[in-house]
């Protein structure tokens, strides 16, 4: 899970990734009116939770895969 986040941070740079992470969380907070739902619907978390059991995921993961989960 955390290694997927690390790859996301490498792609975007640490500051930009956390800025986007916080932005998606704030949008989710307004949309869902729930901090925990905003967390779980964050595209960075959706990618990490959705693939953290797949031990080979990081080897086959395309760059910027988190973008697939924006409208998920």
Image: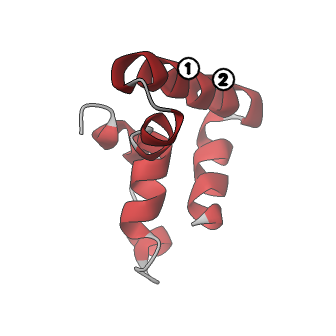
Relative to 59, 68 lies left or right:
left
Label 2, residues with CA under 10 Å away: few <14, some 14-19, many ≥20: few
In the image as oriented, which residue stretches furthest toward the front? 33
Label 1, residues with CA under 10 Å away: few <14, some 14-19, many ≥20: few
Residue in the foreground of this view, choosing between 43 and 41: 41
Color encoding of the figure: secondary structure
Q: Is residue 67 at least partly visible in the picture?
A: yes
Q: Is residue 63 at least partly visible in the picture?
A: no
The numbered dot on residue 72 is: none
Q: Is residue 18 above or below residue 7?
A: above
Residue receiving disc 2: 19
**Residue at disc 1, secondary structure:** helix
Q: Residue at x 41, y 54 (%)?
A: 47
Q: State which quadrant residue 22 falls in.
A: top right
Relative to 34, 31 lies left or right:
left
Residue receiving disc 1: 23
Q: Position of residue 67 (x, y in %)?
A: 36, 37
**Residue at disc 2, secondary structure:** helix
Q: Is residue 57 above or below residue 24?
A: below
In the image as oriented, which residue stretches furthest toward the left? 72
Q: Residue at x 39, y 48 (%)?
A: 65
- Image quadrant occupied by the C terminus: top left
- Image quadrant occupied by the N terminus: bottom right
């Amino acid at each position: 899970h955390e290694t997927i986040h690390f790859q996301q941070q490498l792609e975007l740079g640490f500051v930009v990734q956390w800025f986007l992470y916080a932005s998606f969380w704030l949008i989710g907070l307004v949309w869902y009116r729930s901090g925990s739902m905003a967390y779980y619907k964050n595209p960075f978390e959706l990618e990490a939770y959705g693939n953290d059991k797949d031990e080979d995921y990081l080897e086959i993961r395309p760059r910027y895969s988190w973008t697939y989960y924006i409208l998920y």
